[in-house]
Image (cartoon, helix red, strand yellow):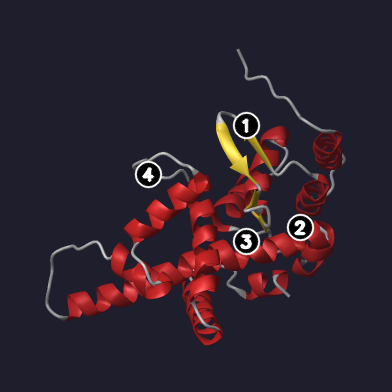
């Protein structure tokens, strides 16, 4: 039997109906999707046996998670290649005017988008950048065996090891010990780490680390057809 879909609130029904009607009327899907996102109000839900958290920590808006959720309601109405570019690479089609992003999303969700961008995307890139620096020095010394540098990279940023951070996080959230995170859980942990960094670092180090994370993110983005210029427009 197909899974029963229950939409919890009027705002969610309105969002889905707006998106479906706009697409059936032949409207461009990016503005229709962003408008539907602006109408949505439920911050977290379980759908298709997966937990979706759209407002991580109550303030970091994961708009791509909500875009994925809404796409299930209009299957076949958005070009599959363009939807894949959005969900897997965070890229809207080139014909969409990125300067309209903020207005379509709305002020509150755009603030949440900025929180997510810096608290999850940039924070994750900062961790990768620091780990890459450690590994570069490690292998430059002539060593060829693999070593997990997680504790060292986390200590450099957060003044404590990955192991200790995980213990603190689980204790604070009353979470059981698990071997791995889901994608949603990983985002939640990353945003929590961002908050830790703001507490333990002085202003100069916060700024320096943020620049490092942004630079690493931009470096990765240069491999894409549309680089960080789009993100700069979104975050302006």
Sooner in the amino-acid sequence: mark 4 or mark 3:
3
Q: CA gap, disc 4 to disc 3?
A: 22 Å
Q: CA gap, disc 1 to disc 3?
A: 21 Å
**Which residue is at the front of the view, 55 or 48?**
55
Q: Give the label on residue 180, or none.
A: 4
Residue at 84 percent of width and 47 percent of height? 27
**Which residue is at the front of the view, 226 or 14?**
14
Sooner in the amino-acid sequence: mark 4 or mark 1:
1
Residue at 49 percent of width and 50 percent of height? 172
Residue at 62 percent of width and 60 percent of height? 91
Q: Does the rendering let one see residue 224?
A: no
Sooner in the amino-acid sequence: mark 2 or mark 4:
2
Return the residue at label 3.
Answer: 116
SS class, disc 1: strand
Q: Quadrant of the C terminus?
A: bottom right
Q: Position of residue 195 (x, y in %)?
A: 55, 65
Return the residue at label 2.
Answer: 109
Sooner in the amino-acid sequence: mark 3 or mark 2:
2
Q: CA gap, disc 2 to disc 4?
A: 29 Å
Sooner in the amino-acid sequence: mark 2 or mark 1:
1
Return the residue at label 1.
Answer: 47
SS class, disc 2: helix
């Amino acid at each position: 039997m197909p899974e029963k879909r229950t939409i919890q609130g009027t705002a969610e029904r309105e969002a889905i109906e707006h998106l479906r009607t706009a697409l059936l009327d032949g409207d461009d899907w990016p503005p229709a999707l962003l408008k539907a996102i602006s109408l949505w109000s439920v911050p977290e839900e379980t759908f298709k046996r997966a937990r979706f958290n759209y407002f991580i920590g109550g303030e970091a808006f994961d708009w791509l998670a909500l875009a994925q959720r809404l796409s299930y309601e209009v299957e076949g109405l958005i070009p599959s290649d363009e939807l894949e570019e959005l969900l897997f690479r965070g890229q809207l089609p080139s014909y969409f005017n990125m300067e309209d992003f903020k207005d379509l999303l709305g002020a509150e969700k755009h603030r949440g988008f900025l929180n997510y961008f810096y608290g999850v995307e940039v924070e994750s890139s900062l961790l990768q950048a620091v780990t890459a620096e450690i590994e570069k020095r490690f292998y430059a010394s002539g060593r060829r065996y693999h070593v997990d540098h997680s504790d060292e990279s986390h200590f450099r940023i957060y003044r404590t090891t990955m192991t200790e951070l995980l213990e603190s996080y689980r204790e604070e959230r009353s979470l059981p010990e698990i071997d791995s995170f889901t994608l949603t859980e990983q985002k939640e942990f990353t945003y929590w780490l961002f908050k830790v960094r703001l507490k333990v670092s002085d202003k100069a180090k916060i700024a320096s680390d943020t620049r490092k994370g942004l630079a690493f993110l931009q470096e990765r983005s240069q491999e894409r057809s549309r680089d960080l210029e789009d993100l700069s427009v979104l975050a302006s």
